[in-house]
Amino acid sequence: MSFRTTSTSVDYVEDVSPGSGALPPRAWYASSDARSLSLNGSWRFRLSPTVDAEDDSFAEPGFDADGWAEVAVPGHWVLQGDGAFGAPIYTNHLYPFPVDPPRVPTENPTGDHLRFFDLPEGWPALSEGGAVLRFDGVESCARVWLNGTDIGEFKGSRLPHEFAVGHLLKPSGNVLAVRVHQWSAGSYLEDQDQWWLPGIFRDVTLLHRPAGSVLDFFVHASYDHVGGLGTLRVDSDVDGRVTVPALDIDVATGEPVTVAVEPWTAETPRLYDGELVTEGERVPLRIGFRTVVLEDGLIKVNGRAILFKGVNRHEWHPERGRALDLETMREDVLLMKRHNLNAVRTSHYPPHPAFLDLCDEYGLWVIDECDLETHGFTEQNWRDNPVDDERWTPALLDRAARMVERDKNHPSVVMWSLGNECGTGRGLTAMAEWIHGRDGSRLVHYEGDWDCRDTDVYSRMYADHAETERIGQGLDGGTQKRRGLPFIQCEYGHAMGNGPGGLADYQRLFEAHDRIQGGFIWEWIDHGVTHAELGFAYGGDFGEELHDGNFVCDGLVFPDRRPSPGLVEFKKVIEPVRIEGDGVAGTVRVRNAHDFADLSSLAFEWSYQVDGETVESGPLAVPALAAGESAEVKLPQPPAGGSGGEAQWTVRALLAEDTGWGRKGHQVAWAQLPVLERPLPSVAPSDRPTASEKLITLGPASFDVRTGALKTIGGVDVTGLRLDVWRAPTDNDAGAAWQPDLRYGLLWRKYGLHRMRHRLDAVEAGEDALTVRTRVAPAAWEIGLNTVYRWTSDGTRLKLTVSVTPDGDWTVPLPRLGIRFGLSSADAVQWYGGGPGEGYPDTKSASMLGRWHASVDELQTPYVRPQENGARPDVRWAELGGLRIDGDPEFWFTARRWTSEQLDAAEHLTDLEAGDTVWVNLDHGQMGIGSQSCGPGALPQYHLLARPAEFSFVFSATR
Ligand code: GAL
């Protein structure tokens, strides 16, 4: 005898179809007058280990859910319940389940959700229309019952799904039951590099649909830049009228009207308020007139080629995952605008629709990307890839339609993207064809299509500088179609940990070649999860059997949205006003690098610094240049006084008035122009080293007589001063396995640069100098650095000159080259040099020369996985712990309460325990940072090669 117990009621989970029962997709909008009821809030919740561990009876009215837990909707259950509801899983591209599409594991966490609600007072009677239940996002598959009736099931996690429910509603005692499965056939289409986070993570809303209400509508608002005219036509499934008071427009739906308008651009986001009125409903419209075309091989908006200065944005909140509230979305947009960004790729799914409203309002170009990625199939050479298997095509088309229909009325959206990292296939072609047919007013993007069969733009990720340049020059070959298309980097500048480096070098290429229309940094925010013991958790911290570690923390802002130095650097690199000039001649050349806006919103200011102190400042009259124009401006006479020191001009472009995103005075762009060079510190050696039984004294300093080790300077204890070449490798030093460049972070360890030994060869007390000769080298290798420390003094100050001569066959650059030492009590730091934040050879565009101060703790950059950080570049002098150090030449300054070795060993910030000693690094050189955690390494000009070097520091006691 044989029997089957397999339930057929759960077949939908592993069914390749997008679902059943949902209404056709349509535009997303908030009605002016139709009622709605948010069903967000606390829902009753029960978690089961499999799809069919529990039957459907919980959906029946009268079911007793008393013993159930509660979860917040919107939310992910794995981020709630203090671990009682499972845990998040992070994988980059590996599916965390066996690849056997469309089958998923039997262990399939299933969350039953219950929401009880009454219709609010005044909710219209059934006879006055219907009602729609809208889910804005559920991961990954849901089945829905209202008052015991099964109304359908759906997949497509970051896409809206609506159900007609009017006939099922009761004035009170409604029971909404939603069964959510973590894994489904849809999971194969959602292999984005992010946490797997099941749950109802976007809003759930009940919408009253009055008779004669708006169904779907499409706002067509184009701009003719030659005539300055906008043409508006609103197509609506239900006839009605369209009004735009500011333009005196009052036309029927479907009827075009052309009037003089101000166009919408990301720089000048002019929106006109309007209204669509049908018999049963009024819908507010926010209309932006703009025309996007591909012309002369370029992406043009309103007749002009645009340059994307963009970022890839995942939705992320360290506590709530992808359940974002409006304020968090606004914070993202404001931070972007304040850092000169002009574009967002919504990697790799359509965002919460409110985010696009904000992009319309504040002005950002958007590449709206479909919720689609099948990257894990790369592990089997893309065999069985759903995007090349027609059984899946309906699901792909459903996803394309849900994105386009939902978001088609946003002026900010200029391109549709089919998805990310899916290889190639007929399903993608079908999506592109459908999108082109439905919306000819925007371009189609997909990175995986290197032949550009389906796309309107040649897009790549992480192309290195050399290749980018070749593409810019049109020397990259490719299909005939591709050769005629513009180029963008939909991802570049991998912002994992310290970095990305090399952004300025990219930007120069982007601006030098018309064909290159910019790019999008990977990515906006670190997806660290707030964690009681670890600070921010990353992959592996929840015991995942497969994970990709901190590869999920690769953003320009930290998980709590504090800007990382990478964002500050990017802001400088992409500033929309270029200020150059000749400080000695007192002339400045200002170029308006906007694509559209003139400079009337900016006020310019000059200031003059001597030795980093501002001695005078004033306004600088700069004409309101049109986009692309430049002008020469004369600076005033340099102020008198302060002569003899290093002098420079600083010129800034500031917001002239408050705007929607920034206050008056907010700095948009700046430059510094040197006038007088710094006089180098000089110490005339006059003191003679004198030895006693234990010590050698020289000027203010004492040394160990046997080892020549420095012990004190003017009463300040100094420990362990010696040559240092080690830095805790950054994520970009370590590099990714698939990158072609050498992975120096690994080679450094192979060659033992983290365990250098210091052999003492001689301590020589001479006429006017104490000389200590050493050889610094790692066990097992013949390479070494012959290092001579030469100490001199004029009686009050102490000068150290370090001479380094590499020995042996050095095939790797050095991480750093300088000295390090410990101070026993140091906290406040002052310095004259680059600041206020950190900078490395290829990340210091934003470093401003000035006088800065910070505590030792404030000098640390809190990368989620600890690594080298916090160096201040171009430092002339620094003061801390009772010492002043003047550099000859300038140096990189770092101070921390732990050693580089401790920093290297730490996996989370909470592993770093402050000791009593502050470890100071004064570096003559630092290795560049690059972007090799997913991209090219540091360019050769930023390599710190092992070469003969000599550098000096002058120490004096300050107390
Ligand atoms: C890309 C991918 C992104 C992300 C990035 C590395 O290949 O599109 O989703 O994984 O690499 O962080």
Image (cartoon, grey):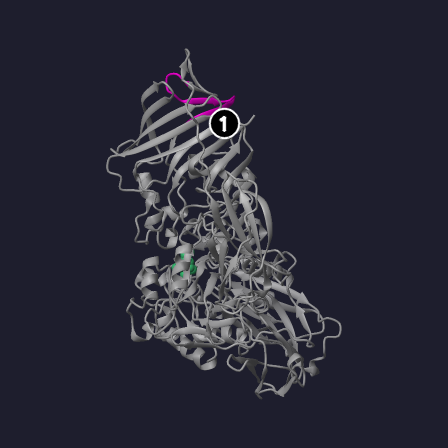
User: Does label 1 point to a residue whose CB lies under 8 Å from ligand 1?
Assistant: no
Compared to 753, does 423 lie above or below? below
- Displayed-image quarter of ligand 1: bottom left
Compared to 253, does 574 lie above or below? above
Quarter containing the C terminus = top right
Tell me which residue sits at (59%, 47%) in the image.
Answer: 616
The image quarter containing residue 385 is bottom left
x, y percent for residue 182:
49, 61
Tell me if I can see residue 208 in this picture: yes
The residue singled out by tag 1 in the image is 956
The answer to if 714 sits in the magenta stretch is: yes
Quarter containing the N terminus = bottom left
Q: Which class describes the residues within 10 Å of circle 1: few (<14), some (14-19), or many (20+)? A: many
Tell me if I can see residue 526 in this picture: no
**Mark 1 residue element:** strand
The answer to if 470 sits in the magenta stretch is: no
| Magenta segment main secondary structure | strand
Segment tinted magenta in the rendering:
704-721
